[in-house]
Structures are given as structure tokens and as C-alpha cells.
Image (cartoon, helix red, strand yellow):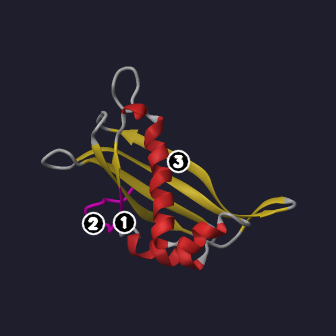
Amino acid sequence: MTLSDPSTTPTYAYEHLVTLEETNVVGNVYFTNYLRWQGHCRERFLMERAPGVMRALHGELALVTASCHCEYFGELYAMDRVSLRMSLTAADDHQLSMAFHYYRTNAAVPQLVARGGQTVACMRRTDQGMCPIPVPEELRAALAPYRSRA
């Protein structure tokens, strides 16, 4: 997946304060927390921009993470402020791909410390198992302003 350049792409931002719980014995943030924050960002986006989709997740709709990844460029520590910026990089009939850029914001100039991405499949729960469905129109419309120009 090509990762978008956040300087040229509108992004949805999720602000996070790192806690001691998220660090390891060395004192830096444990690597899996970056992936957790992708989920937090995605869920916050749904709550704010596509609440009908969020409600539908309690029924037949499932957003299944098909893949995710993260590259690390710097370390984060407890009490660092992180701005996780999400953009849409691709969309097809039933899948969406998003890029995430992680910036430490408690410095004079925000510092890119990581970037990653994930692909999500829209599925319906049935008695026979999961089956792909089209991306809900509310979700497609909510993500449209955040589409990568790359």
C-alpha cells in the first residue's frame, strides 16, 4: 500500500496522551500499542463521522481488519502527546485502506515517529458465516474528504 503524504492530504486526527501502562520495562511505548491506537482512531472516526455505521456494528455489520502494519522512526515515552492522523488511501466495493501517521506533538515542531496502515473489509454476519458486503454509503461519504491525493 502506498502511504499518503499528510502534508498534502486532509487527515482525521486522533489525539492521544501516552500513559505508563503503554510503556515497557525499558520505558518506551511497547510496539503493539501503535496498532491499538489505529483501532482507537478508527473507532473515534466512526463515532464522530459515521454514527449509523457504529450502531450497525451491534447488528449484522462487521468491519474486519484484513491487514495492518506499522513502521517506527522514533520512540515515544509516557506523557508524550501523539497526534495520529488517518487518511483514506484506497476503496473498492467492500474494502477500505487507510494510512496512519503518528506525530509527537509535545515538541516545538511535531515529529513523525511512525507510520502505518490497515485494510478493512466490510462483512455481514450470517448463519453461514461472514460474507462481504458493499461499504456502507454513510462510511464512504464520511471518508471521502480524507482521500489521499497520491
Three-letter code for the amino acid on which mark 1 is drawn: Ala
Residue 113 lies left or right of residue 90; in this view the side is left
**Residue 68 within the magenta-colored segment of the rendering:** no
Q: Which residue is mark 1?
A: 150
Q: Are marks 3 and 2 in contact (CB under 8 Å)?
A: no
Label 1 or label 3, whichever lies nearer to me, is 3
Helix, strand, or loop for circle 3? strand
Helix, strand, or loop for circle 1? loop
Q: Are marks 1 and 2 in contact (CB under 8 Å)?
A: yes
**Residue 10 within the magenta-colored segment of the rendering:** yes
Three-letter code for the amino acid on which mark 3 is drawn: Cys
Residue 137 lies left or right of residue 36; in this view the side is right
Q: Earlier in the sequence, mark 3 or mark 2?
A: 2
> Magenta residues, as a range?
3-14
Q: Nearer the viewer, residue 70 or 48?
A: 48
Q: Is residue 69 above or below residue 48?
A: above
Q: Which residue is mark 2?
A: 8
| Horizontal and vertical percent position of residue 49 | 46, 72
- Give the number of marks: 3
Question: Split into 4 quadrants, where in the image is the C terminus?
Answer: bottom left
What is the magenta segment's predominant secondary structure?
loop
> How far separated are the C-alphas under marks 3 and 2?
23 Å
Q: Residues within 10 Å of mark 3 (few under 14, many from 20)?
A: some
| Horizontal and vertical percent position of residue 149 | 36, 70
The answer to whether residue 52 of the structure is visible from this angle is: yes
Q: Which residue is mark 3?
A: 68
Q: Earlier in the sequence, mark 1 or mark 3?
A: 3
Q: Residues within 10 Å of mark 1 (few under 14, many from 20)?
A: few
Q: Is residue 31 above or below residue 99?
A: above
> How far separated are the C-alphas under marks 1 and 2?
9 Å
Q: Earlier in the sequence, mark 1 or mark 2?
A: 2
Q: Nearer the viewer, residue 57 or 31?
A: 57
